[in-house]
């Protein structure tokens, strides 16, 4: 159950981490935390991208629900079955779509300059929403997540943003097989995807993965900037 309505969110006085990089507001990056965590957990990760994502507003929202043990959740989890992930992400998606729309309007940033990212459950939400946006985000960064509602995606996909997937091979929470499956499915749907699987890493964001994500964004941002001249 979602405990917080999007209409309650005040971007002029947010209760979650917001970072402004640069002097202008060209890009909007929204990074989503994992199950039982909060937005502060993703705020530190955003600093990795300051060298390439200048003039960016970073939002690291708290998920709209609370876990029984404390911390926030995008949707309840009793297990990591595909059915549980599919149903949960689909239920939370309207909230996230509304949050994104409200944020884009508040900061007056074009929808095509949106970057969605997340870790674990947050990565699931980033991918679930990104391929169903009317205007394709500029990029999606999914760390240690999974592709949800795969069976419906073939008919529901309306956007094909450039997608980066990163996973630890020894992840015993969200198995690396989820990342490999996402890579296969997205490529079959003509989504440009780059996938990195790192041996020996557990359920975390490998430092090498964060660096690879920076290089991934450079390949998008620099040509886009040159085209604006």
Image (cartoon, rainbow, N blue to C red):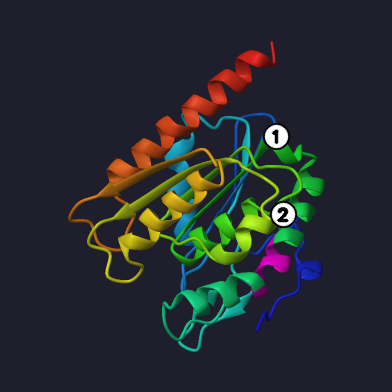
Secondary structure, mark 1, is: loop
The residue beneath circle 1 is 25
In which quadrant of the rendered view does residue 64 lie?
bottom right
| Residue 3 drawn above or below residue 140 | below
Q: Main secondary structure of the magenta part?
A: helix
- The residue positioned 51% from the left and 78% from the top of the image is 83
Measured Cα–Cα span from mark 2 to mark 1: 15 Å
Residue 164 picture location, percent across and down:
46, 43
- The residue positioned 29% from the left and 49% from the top of the image is 197
Q: Which mark is residue 4?
A: none
Assess whether residue 20 is covered by the magenta stretch. Answer: no
Q: Residue 169 vs residue 37: left or right?
A: left
Along the viewing direction, whichever of 215 and 154 lies nearer the viewer: 154
Picture quarter with the C terminus:
top right
User: Dot 1: few (<14), some (14–19), or many (≥20) neighbours within 10 Å?
Assistant: some
Residue 211 picture location, percent across and down:
35, 37
Residues rendered magenta in the picture: 91-96
Residue 202 picture location, percent across and down:
25, 62
Along the viewing direction, whichever of 167 and 74 lies nearer the viewer: 167
The disc, 2 or 1, on the residue closer to the chain's N-terminal end is 1
Q: Residue 185 vs residue 108: left or right?
A: left
The residue beneath circle 2 is 100
Secondary structure, mark 2, is: helix
């Amino acid at each position: 159950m979602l405990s917080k309505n999007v209409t309650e969110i005040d971007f002029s006085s947010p209760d979650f981490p917001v970072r402004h990089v640069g002097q202008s507001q060209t890009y909007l990056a929204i990074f989503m935390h994992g199950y039982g965590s909060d937005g502060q957990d993703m705020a530190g990760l955003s600093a990795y991208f300051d060298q390439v994502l200048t003039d960016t507003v970073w939002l690291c929202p708290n998920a709209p629900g609370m876990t029984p043990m404390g911390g926030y959740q995008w949707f309840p989890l009793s297990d990591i079955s595909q059915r549980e992930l599919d149903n949960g992400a689909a239920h939370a998606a309207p909230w996230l779509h509304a949050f994104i729309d409200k944020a884009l309007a508040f900061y007056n940033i074009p929808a095509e300059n949106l970057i969605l990212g997340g870790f674990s459950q947050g990565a699931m939400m980033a991918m679930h929403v990104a391929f169903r946006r009317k205007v394709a985000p500029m990029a999606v960064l999914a760390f240690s997540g999974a592709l949800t509602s795969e069976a419906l995606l073939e008919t529901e996909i309306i956007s094909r943003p450039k997608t980066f997937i990163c996973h630890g091979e020894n992840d015993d929470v969200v198995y690396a097989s989820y990342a490999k499956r996402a890579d296969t499915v997205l490529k079959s749907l003509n989504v440009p995807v780059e996938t990195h699987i790192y041996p020996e890493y557990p359920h975390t964001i490998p430092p090498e993965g964060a660096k690879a994500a920076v290089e991934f964004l450079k390949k998008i941002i620099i040509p886009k900037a040159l085209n604006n001249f």
